[in-house]
Amino acid sequence: MHRVFVYGSLKRAQPNYPLITDSSNGKAELLATATTVQKYPLVIATQYNIPFLLNLPGQGHRVHGELYRVDEKMLKYLDWFENIPTMYQRTVVELEINELADVVDEELSPGNITEASVYSTTTYQPDWPSLPAYQSYDSNADHGLKFVLREDRNWASARRC
Ligand code: PCA
């Protein structure tokens, strides 16, 4: 089993959450909400308003997200979906556990520090570190930068032409 920290479109109530709950992609169980121990810039970039955690520890905010336990199948699926290693890289992040979910994991309790994988990026555009940084991602927040689902992306760029 693996642990993955999600901070963007894969969180509950965000556009790609259905992928994590789809058992044909593998198994994922919510363990807890968590916050990164270090600060990172969580920015929204590209014409499709995609959230990226830039691998620049010490800048931005301590980022809020959700910690999942996933099986090998789901990890492979997420690696494929997140375009590893082109768009994101899967790195290890240190987390502080906030609230525990219903799934019991003996090692976790609120306030504990633990590690998990995260889809972060070092392959960002030069201007991304100066974009507004968020503490907690929400596609529908008042920044107005609503996430464009992958299946809508060609259509969106076709309309612009
Ligand atoms: N999906 C991954 C990385 C960014 C995104 O939108 C996540 O939610 O953690």
Image (cartoon, grey):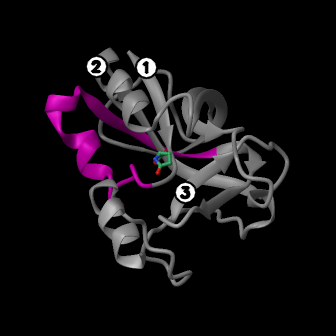
**Crowd class of label 2 (few under 14; some 14 to 19; many from 20; radius 10 Å):** some
- Badge nearest the viewer, 2 or 1: 2
Residue at point 22% right, 42% down?
A: 21
Would residue 95 be found to the left or right of residue 77 on screen? Answer: right
Residue situated in front as seen by the camera: 73 or 107: 73
Residue at point 42% right, 77% down?
A: 160
Q: Which residue is mark 1?
A: 2
Label 3: element kind:
strand
Would residue 24 be found to the left or right of residue 115 on screen? Answer: left
Work out whether mark 2 precedes mark 1 in sequence or the reverse, and give the earlier one. Answer: 1
**Picture quarter with the N terminus:** top left
Considering every residue shown, the one lying at the far right of the view is 58
Give the magenta-colored segment's residue range: 9-35
Examine the image and state in which quarter residue 9 appears: bottom left
Q: CA distance from mark 2 to mark 1?
A: 10 Å
Label 2: element kind:
helix
**Residue 16 horizontal/vertical position (percent):** 32, 52
Residue at point 30% right, 40% down?
A: 102
Work out whether mark 3 precedes mark 1 in sequence or the reverse, and give the earlier one. Answer: 1
Q: Which residue is mark 3?
A: 51
Considering every residue shown, the one lying at the far left of the view is 24
**Residue 108 horizontal/vertical position (percent):** 50, 29
**Crowd class of label 1 (few under 14; some 14 to 19; many from 20; radius 10 Å):** few
